[in-house]
Amino acid sequence: MKRLVYSLMAGVLMSACAGSKMPEDKYDIRVDELLQRMTLEEKIGQMNQLSALESLDAMSEEIRQGRVGSIFNETDPHRINTLQRVAREETRLGIPLLMARDVIHGFRTIAPIPLGQAASFDLEAVEAAARVAAIEASSAGIRWTFSPMIDIARDARWGRIAEGYGEDTYLTSMMGAAVVRGYQTDNLADPTAIAACAKHFAGYGASEGGRDYNSANIPIRQLHDVYLPPFEAAAKAGAATFMTSFNDIDGIPSTANGYLMRSLLHEEWGSDAMVVTDWSSATEMLAHGNCRDTLDVALQTINAGVDMDMVSNAYIRYLPKLMKDGVIPEILINEAVRRILKLKFDLGLFDNPYVDESKLQAYTPEALSATLRIATESAVLLKNDNSLLPLGKEVKSVALIGPLADDTYEQFGTWAFDGEPEHTITPLKAMLSVDGVKVIHDKALTHCRDLKGDGIRQAVQRAKSADVIVCVVGEEAIMSGEAHCLADINLYGKQKELVAELSKTGKPLVTVIMAGRPLTIADEVEKSDALLYMFHPGTMGGQALVDLLFGKAVPSGKLPVTFPRMVGQIPIYYNHKNTGRPAEGNELLINQTPVRAAQTALGCHSYWLDAGYGPLFPFGYGLSYTTFAYSDLKLDKDRMKLENDSIEVSFTLTNTGNVEATEICQLYVRDLVGSVSRPVKELKGFRRVTLKAGESQRVSMKIFVENLQFCGLDYYTYQEPGEFRLWVGCNSDDNRNEATFYVD
Ligand code: GLC
């Protein structure tokens, strides 16, 4: 049973005390010896992080003055070696620099945005993509990335939904841990290993209204049941660093939240991860209004247990005064510097600070293969009427239409600073290599935000001559990511009109959407014969798409986030509470409602008159070119004890179609009655199963009683006894295979 400190304030007050105990580490002696030799200025210098400047001389001077522990956004290996040489040879103690970069979904070879990777439900492929990123970034001298971003996001208006792994806590926890493993391997000193950074700690995805940087008013139980578990999983996976988030949780900005860093991260989870602020999130607390001045910023930040200050200069300018005035004990500085030095030792930087400039790794066959795999598995087939896809040999000509059919930059998506468009495979580039198919390409619109649509008429006219139309639309990279939030998530500009006009030709229409978020696409679904969703697919996105269109690959992706019918339904997510008046799905909609209907005629259930109750597509939804049947669900027992117990769930999966394909089997659980109300469903397991046409396989998964814990009435987190429902199926709305079990 994990004790939960009831009040966030209790955590903050606790943070004012001396530092927390760190687990034993093999470098403790070397760290202690070095720490004892350091002056206060040198210690505080280690706690300061700079973003790279154009001038090497200016950065070198800061390093010589002992004012820098880390530099990020420098990507040139020669400049990195030059800066490291200054640190190693021109400072009193020769402490190496931590060189960092936002390698969020690839360095040179760009994988799909994390939201797309989550759609693969393939932990191995996601880990492999992170490994590619680490190999390429470390070959340039970068040994720390600010990733994985594991903020749970239930609001498609929030631009940063693109950077995380969706709405589900269990999936995000598993994905985040896989990315940590991919970056760090099991040996941080491996020259290809880079330190991971679990961000943004915490609750950032709950920014009110889907407006970035906004307050997150998260009830304590929801904080512990929904938003924190991915960070605990990252800590357990050994994430070397954490980053504090910009938002406040109920009035406490995370950068000053000692409950997060001291009570949870270091005490309860037992992690000695080094904690860095987000970009100037320290001094942004002046705007938040919880700090009087920058001296107070430095005090609250160090008290909360933050070790390194990203670019705000609060530490470098004000920690000396806080020390001189006896406001803080030196132990707070020592514990921060100890974590920073330990990370540098762990990375092997004292012994191997330089990178071999002749061995830059980029676009290797292994990298491209791993990236093609994850891009293919990240695509989600949402509609395929009359099995239009895959396109058969009878298709001799394809009209490839739309602003994203051949845009090497936009298909990277957000946070892809170092990808090189010239290495990118677009849908057009890939389709031109398909034998026996004539391609008629027309961009139709100047770009996704084209508000004139002057090119639509010509594009539609040209499309009429083809056997099939493939229309590629969606979002430009700039339309999602940090500070890029939308209040309307329809297809932007004249894209809706383009799809509608192409649909009127009567030609088979495949709509492909590349975006950084779920969009409200009910019209496009209705007007298209087939629809494939590719969350910005990265370097190999065009090849993945064409392989899927022509059947060289079969779609397996499932939605990691709910797709609303209308933006007004947000927040809408599958693992919601039942309420006292749950909708039954048969409620009258506004257009079915008689004029002057009696006030109570519509029943009193929880739904929208204009949008109904459910989403356009539920979490976990995705089609294939085959069909699968689930049968013969069995439990090895139907009762579990409260501790150290599990139930084995097994069922038969059959490929009832005529192509080999992969199904992502999902296991959901519902706790019928708790000391507080519980979600109607929670994902507790998933398995990728590949079957030949007609093949059947027995599939099994385990439910561990510890995975049923939640934050109860008294704010403790533990398991309660009770009756549970369980489902296995193809998405979160599939209730066909149900069982019951009990915890005693
Ligand atoms: C940004 C982001 C953060 C990123 C950091 C460094 O503002 O919030 O995710 O890692 O600054 O670029």
Image (cartoon, helix red, strand yellow):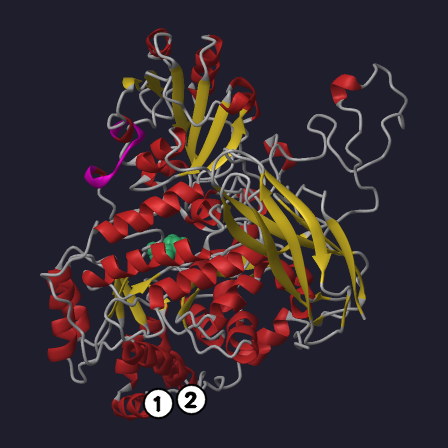
Near mark 1 (Cα within 10 A), the count class, few <14, some 14-19 or many ≥20, is some
Residue underneath mark 1: 28
The answer, for residue 112, to whether it is visible in the render is no
**Which residue sits at x=85%, y=27%?**
602
Magenta residues, start to end: 422-429
Residue 726 visible in the snapshot: yes
Asked if residue 184 is positioned above or below residue 561 in the image, the reply reads: below
Q: Is residue 282 left or right of residue 209?
A: left
Q: Secondary structure at mark 1?
A: helix
| Quarter in which the N terminus is drawn | bottom right
Rendering coords of residue 497 (x, y %)? 46, 15
Q: Is label 2 in contact with label 1 (beta carbons under 8 Å)?
A: yes
- Quadrant of the image containing the C terminus: bottom right
Mark 2 burial class by Cα count in 10 Å: few <14, some 14-19, many 20+: few
Q: Which mark is residue 403?
A: none
Specify the principal SS of the magenta part: helix
Residue 85 found in image quarter: bottom left
Q: Which residue is mark 2?
A: 24
Magenta segment: does it hold 425?
yes
State the image coordinates of residue 493 (x, y, percent, origin top left): 43, 22
Residue drawn at x 37%, y 35% is 552
Residue sitting nearer the eye, 441 or 337:
441
Vertical arrangement, residue 634 with respect to residue 87, above or below: above
